[in-house]
Amino acid sequence: MIRRLALGLALAAVSCNKTVEDSGDPSPQPPAWRLGEVLDTEGPAVFAKTTGSWGGDLYLLRLQGTHYEMGYQHGRLVGVELMEMWWTYMAALGAEMNITDPVVVDTILGNLLDQAWEQYGPNTPQIFLDELQGMADGMAAEGLSYGDSEADLVLLPQRLITLMDLAMSSQLDPSDLSGIATFLQSGYTAALLDYYGEAPPALTPRMAEAMDTIRAAKPTGNLMGPGLNCSYYAAWGPRTQDGSMIVTRNMDFAADTGMDKYAMITVFVPDQGVPYASISWLGAATGALAGISAEGITVSAVGASSPLERIKTEPALFRAREVLEFAHNLDEAKPYLYNTVGDGLTRAPTIGYNALLTWGDPRGAGAGAEAIIVEHNGLSIGAYHHHSDCSVDTELVRFDLEGTSTTHTAQTDPELVNTEAEAKEIDALAQIRTFAHDGTDYLRDESGRYIDDPAGVPLQTGRPMDCAVYRGDEAMAYGVRMHQTACGGPADGGDDVMIDGGSYKYRYTPMRLLTEAWETGSALEWKGEELVPAGAPTLIGLDEGELVSRTAAMGSNVWDVVYDATKLKIRVSYESGTGEGWTAASAQPPFMEIDLDDLFLLNDQAAR
């Protein structure tokens, strides 16, 4: 566990407490605020703070206008705290990497993140480039500095979005500097280049120098910090109270880093788009790790390691924001997933992760609610589109080197596309494995491993249920799973099996068992605790969603969110404390419930 470090930086002395000041601009004015204490305003934007149910502060930031204006408001209102948060995380990463000076960590990561941005930047929509520049200008207006000149301030938000995207990558192990160099310089991992029949590029002098800097620092551990080993769940229609779309998203990351001080919900009210909220940390809302729109669309993501990754594409967390801002249902979201937007930018999948998109259909009281699970690596996505009637469309989408996609369906390519119910343990060629079976049960060897047997029985992995979805980092689509190292994936040597993996045993399985218990009214005991008593069947609501979130969380659980994407309510919880007093988000008192109307303020006549 990373331990909180006291920073000897002058910046740490800057107070986070602000007073509301008159900007001198009579128009536009901020809306009347309903939740917590207003700390500062900038035009129509509001920065506020309240106390979370876990006892810590929860910051609230509502931005409104063009993307440049929202970026400026963002940087001006929370630039001081954002800078503090950055150096806090640099110190925490340094503790992980055995580097005591956060400035050294910033130098090492800065070189790498800037190289990665050279791949991401050309594929980033202009609205977000405008927003990043606005953030830098807003921070400059606060008198902040980063780098060698005022022009370098934009590097901080660029590095932040890049760091968040790469935090899910498994390709940044400092023991493989050659692999890191290939990945950042070409935009593809060596394994993905090999798949496409391309040779790794020769190192540029700049990249060679960056690798020398890393080599001299002798870091340990993943250079971007621990991976995002999270989980998510959704249920709707006949399973839920009033037919609402109930969704969970666990954030299992690096515990006790000091980031708990920066818990924040950021609301974007764009001039040309749908308002939405991004739930994470202060400043980290430049991309959406978890979010919900006023149209009832939610996004969630889980890191899922794979050797096939690319960054010559749009950052995934910007893509999530595009979905929240521009989609009114999941059919409108699909072009951003399949790279068919047609604006000349590449939106091919990036690194290995599983994403969940849901639509709660708030205008229709949940009648059209549906969900899509999208399992990613840099080559393919496996998509499971669950409709409001509980039917499922399954697709496998493959991408070429330039990011052009080809969609395969069970109807057109049944040999490539499998349903979740068909998912079984496979090998690195996507061939179904069979294991020794005595007619009653599977056999294991002395080390506890299942025994491969050509005449044996397949191991079932997919356990789907109608109008419910759940995942950790395991992929059920063969075209994705064959390249996974996550959860005992075939690309990790082929000796392990999914159902013995921690994600499957402690996230996928209990979420399924809870759903079954509520459906049947049967009792469920998990890890010695009775989670569901025997009785009548139970319809799932926010209380049940909170229990799912608590049960599936890992020991590194830093924040959680539960959505009612139909009634537009959320519940949130964050980690608290430090050292021996550290408490996971999932172990906190009842999660804090927020009506999103108090953040969107769409009916407030004072809003611009």
Image (cartoon, rainbow, N blue to C red):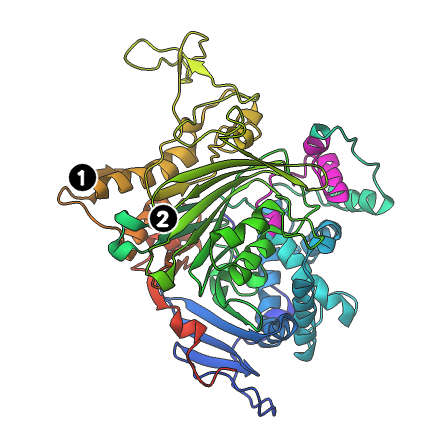
Numbered disc in front, either 1 or 2: 2
Q: Residues within 10 Å of mark 2 (few under 14, many from 20)?
A: many
For the residue labelled by badge 1, is the local secondary structure a helix, a strand or a loop? loop
Which residue: 65% across, 68% down?
A: 131
Q: Is residue 289 above or below residue 478?
A: below
Tell me the kind of residue under disc 1.
Ala
Which residue: 51% across, 46% down?
A: 228
Residue at the outermost front position: 412
Q: How far across and how far down the image is residue 72, in percent?
A: 64, 74
Closer to the camera, 430 or 447?
430
Tell me the kind of residue under disc 2.
Ser
Closer to the camera, 114 or 34?
34
Is residue 110 visible to us here?
A: no
* C-alpha separation, residue under disc 1 versus residue under disc 2: 28 Å
Instruction: Name the residue carrying label 2.
Output: 388
Instruction: Name the residue carrying label 1.
Output: 523
Q: Where on the picture, by quarter, is residue 533?
A: top left
Q: Is residue 450 above or below residue 26?
A: above
Q: How far across and how far down the image is residue 63, in percent?
A: 54, 73
Q: Which residues are magenta?
A: 165-193
Closer to the camera, 306 or 177?
306
Is residue 411 toward the left or the right of residue 54 in the image?
right
Q: Earlier in the sequence, mark 1 or mark 2?
A: 2
Residue at the outermost top position: 455
Is residue 460 visible to us here?
A: yes
Is residue 175 toward the left or the right of residue 253 in the image?
right
Label ID, residue 184: none
Closer to the camera, 244 or 155?
244
Q: Residues within 10 Å of mark 1 (few under 14, many from 20)?
A: some
